[in-house]
Amino acid sequence: MIKKIFFQSIFFNLLFFKEVFAAESGGMPQLNPEFWISQIFWLTITFGALYIILSKLILPKISLNLELRKSQIQDNIEAAEKQRENSEAKLKEFDDIIKKSKLKAKKNYQEARENALKEINFKREALDKQIDEEIKKTEHEIKILKKSAPEKINKIAIESSSELVKKLIGAEVNNSSISAIVDDLSKRNGDKYYGN
Amino acid sequence: MAANPMTQFEVYRIGPEIKVGAFDISFTNASLFMIVSSLAILIVFNLGSKKNSLIPSKIQLLAELSYTFVSKMISDTAGSKAKPYFSFIFSLFMFVLFCNMFGMIPYTFTVTSHIIVTFMLAAFIFIGVTIIGFVKHGFGYLKLFVPSGVPVVLLPLIIIIEIISYLSRPVSLSVRLFANMMAGHTMMKVFGGFVVSLGIVGGWLPLSFSVALTGLEILVAFLQAYVFAILTCIYLNDALNLHH
């Protein structure tokens, strides 16, 4: 409402310019032409200077800044993309290496296992042979000993018997008669004494 | 001063009287606030464009947002052909906006509340746009006054109306801004006067009005600057892309 009144008053003021001023001294200061030229002059200077400085110095800088930021962000995105691809490739390589090394490790393990088994078998065979030989040798020795044992025992028995007899009755006894007795005894009880 | 709400619009001389021939171009409070507004714009946008960081500082963000705001406004209303006039429209928008906003500070002077200032701006725009129109289209620019699809009988009337509406552009453009600023400031002054005269008992109501009006006036200050700039863009659009 107030705006409308102002609007109308301005139009009427514009129409009856001089009359308004003649009638009213304390009216709208805007319509006092005393400083119009001064205002036009200073408006031209300040707005002109503002326009020139803004258009020549400041606005190109802002637009450059905006473009730089845009391109920088674009560059960063591209770099990130590239790095992502790189890291993916690296990851693939890494996986390949791991796979390969796993295979290799398996192979190595298998080989080592086989080698070890072979060696163990070889050593076992050698040991078995050795043991067999030793067993055979000892068996042979035992056989010899077994063979010679009754004779020795007989001999010892004969000798000790003759000594015993000599001590007991103080008479010399013929060795051959004693040996006959011992032989007879050993034949009878041989199984009992040397039974295997 | 409080008695008359119109005294706030008075122009007075600061310093000596300067005369060039018959013209008085003395430095006045209006000149002072034109310079203050321009300097404020330059300081803000210089600080905002000084160094370019990827993550902008607050003042840089302000400058860049204003830049994109005005640039989007121009490209939306006048298309890509209006790009060479970006600097002018940006300066115009910022000048009007800052003058309006500085006027909102108590005891300051509102440059844009003077018809002569707004009329000079509007007349400059009008003449500039008309020249651009004739340079771009030659006499074909006169087709602006002949809308297509109008019956031939009505054509003489329409042409007259179109010409009047075209010629009244600077008046409407300047008066819109000037009247808005003046009315708003006068109203605030009137309500301020009520607060004083009604005192501590009855002054609260006009005070709350005053507070509300301050908010409204800040909105109007921005809105009128925006309207001024966008109408300039629309006039420019008529001159650049003749599509009547």
Image: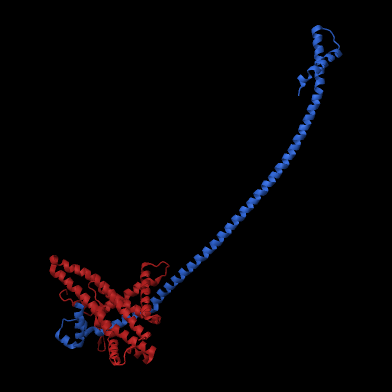
The quarter of the picture where the N terminus of chain A appears is: bottom left
Tally the marks.
Answer: 0
Figure check: A111 above or below B154: above
Figure check: B242 above or below B3: below
Residue B233 visible, this angle: yes
Q: Which quadrant of the structure image shows residue B186?
A: bottom left
**Residue at 82%, 23% in the rendered image:** A148
Residue A183 percent across, percent down from the top left: 83, 17
Residue B71 percent across, percent down from the top left: 38, 76
**Residue at 73%, 42% in the rendered image:** A122
- Chain appearing in red on the rendered image: B
B209 lies left or right of A77? left
Q: Which quadrant of the structure image shows residue B46?
A: bottom left
Q: Which quadrant of the structure image shows residue B10?
A: bottom left
A54 vs B183, nearest the viewer? B183
Residue B35 visible, this angle: no
Residue A87 percent across, percent down from the top left: 54, 61
Residue B194 percent across, percent down from the top left: 15, 71
Figure check: B113 above or below B59: below
- Chain appearing in blue on the rendered image: A
Colour style of the rendered protein structure: by chain
**Residue at 29%, 75% in the rendered image:** B223
Figure check: B219 above or below A162: below
A172 vs A145, nearest the viewer? A145
The quarter of the picture where the C terminus of chain A appears is: top right
B214 lies left or right of A78? left
A87 vs B61, nearest the viewer? A87
**Residue at 71%, 44% in the rendered image:** A118
B241 vs B131, nearest the viewer? B241
